[in-house]
Image (tube, coloured by chain):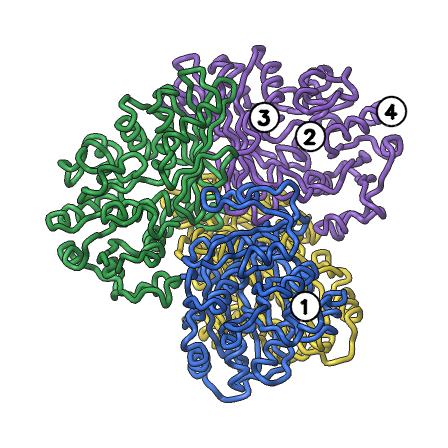
Chain colours: A green, B yellow, C blue, D purple
Amino acid sequence: MVRVGILGATGYTALELIKILLRHPGVEITTLTSRQEGNPHVTAIHPQLMGRLDVNLEDLAPETVAARTECAFSCLPHATSAAMVMKMLETDVRVVDFSADYRLLDADTYAKWYGHKHPDPDRLGNTVYGLPELFGSKIPDAQLIANPGCYTSTSILALAPLLSGGLIESKGIIIDAKSGISGAGRSPKLTTLYPECNESLSAYAVGRHRHTPEIEQILAISSGQDVEVIFTPHLVPMDRGILCTIYATPTTEATEDQLLDAMRSFYADKPFVRVVDHLPATKDVSGTNFCDMTVRLVKGRVIVLSCTDNLIKGASGVAVQNFNLMHEFDETTALL
Amino acid sequence: MVRVGILGATGYTALELIKILLRHPGVEITTLTSRQEGNPHVTAIHPQLMGRLDVNLEDLAPETVAARTECAFSCLPHATSAAMVMKMLETDVRVVDFSADYRLLDADTYAKWYGHKHPDPDRLGNTVYGLPELFGSKIPDAQLIANPGCYTSTSILALAPLLSGGLIESKGIIIDAKSGISGAGRSPKLTTLYPECNESLSAYAVGRHRHTPEIEQILAISSGQDVEVIFTPHLVPMDRGILCTIYATPTTEATEDQLLDAMRSFYADKPFVRVVDHLPATKDVSGTNFCDMTVRLVKGRVIVLSCTDNLIKGASGVAVQNFNLMHEFDETTALL
Amino acid sequence: MVRVGILGATGYTALELIKILLRHPGVEITTLTSRQEGNPHVTAIHPQLMGRLDVNLEDLAPETVAARTECAFSCLPHATSAAMVMKMLETDVRVVDFSADYRLLDADTYAKWYGHKHPDPDRLGNTVYGLPELFGSKIPDAQLIANPGCYTSTSILALAPLLSGGLIESKGIIIDAKSGISGAGRSPKLTTLYPECNESLSAYAVGRHRHTPEIEQILAISSGQDVEVIFTPHLVPMDRGILCTIYATPTTEATEDQLLDAMRSFYADKPFVRVVDHLPATKDVSGTNFCDMTVRLVKGRVIVLSCTDNLIKGASGVAVQNFNLMHEFDETTALL
Amino acid sequence: MVRVGILGATGYTALELIKILLRHPGVEITTLTSRQEGNPHVTAIHPQLMGRLDVNLEDLAPETVAARTECAFSCLPHATSAAMVMKMLETDVRVVDFSADYRLLDADTYAKWYGHKHPDPDRLGNTVYGLPELFGSKIPDAQLIANPGCYTSTSILALAPLLSGGLIESKGIIIDAKSGISGAGRSPKLTTLYPECNESLSAYAVGRHRHTPEIEQILAISSGQDVEVIFTPHLVPMDRGILCTIYATPTTEATEDQLLDAMRSFYADKPFVRVVDHLPATKDVSGTNFCDMTVRLVKGRVIVLSCTDNLIKGASGVAVQNFNLMHEFDETTALL
């Protein structure tokens, strides 16, 4: 049994992570942290877990977490996460970091998009990006995994086959992305209050969303060319689910079927990507670790549609997928 | 034109009130108050009002509001409201108070349920309760109107005909009430965050909801007997709407049709109560000032079903209905 | 591996059943039936199952299903189900019937509530009702299990401890029940069209819902006394979840804590009932086989609140729980 | 009073139309048609209208409707609508046709997209397209108005200022459109069943939606150049609202502010278009006849965001706006 801890265990990704790990035959959850006063029992925060898990949330130093666990998942916000993680990495504990802190390749881009200096800049560029479909070979030996963002992985998985195959131009890509509200986290704020976002739909952070450089950098690495995307996120009145509708310019005369074939080949042995003929719906992947995708050719444009459950394949599911690879479990353990 | 002001203009009831008043041919909105810093324009708070209303929200003393208006609607929270209202009533401005401050009949009950001493106890018992269907004759001459609670009016309107007609027992009444989320207000809190209450349903404040004494006291006045209710509110994942399912014990052999007739007679000349044969749905009254209701007899029990839009008939619509009666407009002005 | 078939595999309960069975280490799904033309692949009906299950839906005779399976789950509508099931029972296949056909105790009650003669009346009164918390000892040896209705099990589980303990009166019980829309099935109809039921709330079938006699008869058996309930179902705008708010008259001076204790004792060794102190929310049990419940004493009335996921504990989850008991798997297999 | 009739009065656009017309001081609704058996009262179909309107739905010949009304709104489906409308136009009744039948400019395009020959081809190309912001001068004298589609008007209003001003290229425009479910109509079908589309999001009819040629043709007329768009509609789990996120290539060095200014100038005297600085949300226009829009420049791309209530500005509101212009009422009558 691998002893596991979760840093910042009060939010939605932590809850999903716990639910998945409770199904995992090789995991024991020993440690949950939070700054909540009074060390509340996990079921006081997540009543869904009544009778499932008997652990209190504690405000612990990184050394303590490291001592109690072999693998820690950090669900802390950016900056806070790196501050904890860099200390834990001094031990031999392994870490899957849900925050954006180790996803970008350089400290300048980080500072530009996150508004503060990176506390641990040397690890940028050297950290394994935890998207197993693209970087699976590097994951087993990594001590630290930068777990991808939800919009990011849904976008990258859709574009990687076509970019790597040279089938679309790497500039001028438009990603029109739509997400359920859980992606905005569990901190009360006006914009995600029920009566504000129910029965409403809007774009936000147009041209300024922090997943933009992450998408561009990771696709550049995976496809070996500079990539430029316009990324427009929208908030949709539903709990969970991301749909990316992506517009790109083809570089070849490839037909729709050939594009589909290229996607199918690229993901031939990947258990969690499903290239489908129909137009995918977020409901088809809700509660699962799948990314469903398809492609259309319309008036000389390539349109790729991809969807995931933002809390599972977009966060906690892929984290366990990474964990499985790190700890020599079957990649799909606890995820089907 | 009656010059009108709204105290506490940032919330959902204030927004609905403004939207109704903008349709009113005899009203000019001159004043909006809020403690928001920087005196924001109303459209910064309510973008729905772009191009409709050009007023800033100001942090004003009660005397200033009174000087600028002939009628003020207070959408302030309880306690805060009475503190403002009691000062305004020293002038000749008229006030419709949305808070619970002047709804109860005595200071002891108020202190027990609201947890603090009433700042203006002498007006309790002397204030007109603004439910025009029951107290319409007293409204035209009132300086102060206690605008009813949303659960309260939906419950009272359903029960008044049967209690006043002696058709049901006044004790042991069960009100199983269900409300949309807007009833919980516009202050960000965890319980009304979208991912918390979407796709969920629960009871809350069982046996402890503050509308309980209000229902009992007003029904006691209107029917001339002590009334005791068990009131169980539930939060339903929708923006607006209240449905009360009420269980009572009949005192007579009256048939279902006779009960329906009693309700129809009671509300014969009331423009905003619709006694219907079918089971009413909140969608039928959404965005309207109507209260739809019906009655069933099941195994010797009377079941009354009533519904309203909690923000309209449950708050801002009935407030304008009161305003119309106070200022000699037709009762339905701006409300159909 | 137990070879399993599902009759009527196009609906929501069948989909949930398949998803649970795919996690079951001792099950092979060999057969799915439907009257859909052209023997569609299961993923044409349920795209969620892409890559998970490779079976076509066929229009099969009961004998064929019996020959291919050791256990069949019938998700067919009432009447249609019994017609199939009674023929299958002539073989040694075992059956879990989701329909209401074998839940009632006598053919007269069935005819009265379902409007037609029962095709297999001799089995009424002799069939095991598949609520393992009450009838667990009879399930292992049963050839046929009548799988409970969703409202029914949520109501019965809430009331059984108090009725069996003699803590509440068995007459005059009021069950105010609220359900998500999936309970109404997957056949297109106006009443469950999205724009009809979204942002709306209403009661339906007041005094006439077919789960009423089922609740009364099963509670009578389990508690050894005549039971009479008033059952009022409501449709709530959410996919899944049932909350029952139940009002009963206490027979003793038992305190709230004593009532809670009685419930906890009753379900001491039952893995899927959680007696909680807080007010349960349907979200806490969504996607799980749990029934969460609590009890309150208000003004001399007992209020029991219970909730389930109508598709899991209310249908497919309890079916697998029954299956586990029938086939000597651990009761929780595939359900946690 | 203008005597008004509505053909096909059972759907959502007809209901919204009735609700608006009931507020209109110059309208009497004399006639409602439907093929429903038994001439049901309008409140049997639309219980929201209880006490508001006392008219039965009848299955009437076009001549009868023409005789009873001065203006008829047709909410019939395409093909059915033209068959009725062409006969009514032989009288002097005026018609606002909600269907697509008279929106396109030529019979060939119609046949290609709608799959059948147009029954009244000579009127194509000669019918006034009822978007008052663009064709307001032609509306007062028209006997027949082709009321725009909901996606169409939301898209056209967003693009017209930039295309007419020569600020964006007229080819390669991408319209990523998202709509609430009411846009799919009130006929029960699986795709719009609550549990199918709640908590889900997907694209549909990619590259094949019938509003595509309508957008291209009307924008071509209004801007005097060929226009080509890629139109991708999505279904969003909410009752109403459309948001179009539109990507275009600028032709000039115009700044974001200059683009906003161009939009503001274009709509300077138009009461129902609001060019806003913030990112518009569908909730801001829900229940109103407004179209809110803004523009952003991102990485050398123009992004226009526009939203409407699909049932109001996208259907019934603009119809009344047309009616007002046809019958010399103020353009905003009954619409604010």
Residue located beneath label 2 in the image: D330
Residue A50, image quadrant: bottom left
Secondary structure, mark 1, is strand
User: Which percent across, then down, holds residue A139?
Assistant: 23, 41
Q: Position of residue D325 (x, y in %)?
A: 71, 26
Under tag 4, what secondary structure? loop
Contact (CB < 8 A) between labels 4 and 3? no
Which residue carries the number 1 mark?
A: B304
Residue at the (49%, 37%) spot, across then down: A280
Task: Give me the residue at 25% from left, 50% from top.
Answer: A73
Q: How far apart are marks 1 and 2 (CA)?
A: 45 Å
Viewer can see residue C68:
yes
CA distance for labels 4 and 3: 36 Å
Q: Residue furthest bottom?
A: C252
- Residue denoted by label 3: D208
C211 over A59 or under it: above or below: below
| Residue found at the very far top of the displayed protein | D225
Could you say which is closer to the camera, residue C320 or residue A7? C320
Could you tell me the amino acid type at mark 1?
Answer: Val
Tell me which amino acid carries mark 2.
Answer: Asp
Q: Do the residues bearing badges 4 and 1 touch, measured as CB atoms within 8 Å?
A: no
Please name whichever residue, C335 or D299, is drawn nearer the observer in this view of the structure: C335
Asked if A245 appears above or below B263 in the picture, the reply is above
Give the chain letter at badge 2.
D
**Lateral position of residue D17 relative to residue B197, left or right:** right
Residue D91 — which label? 4
Q: Mark 3 lies on which chain?
A: D
Query: Nearer the observer, disc 1 or disc 3?
Result: 3
Q: Give the chain letter at badge 4.
A: D
Question: Percent position (x, y) of residue D93?
Answer: 83, 27
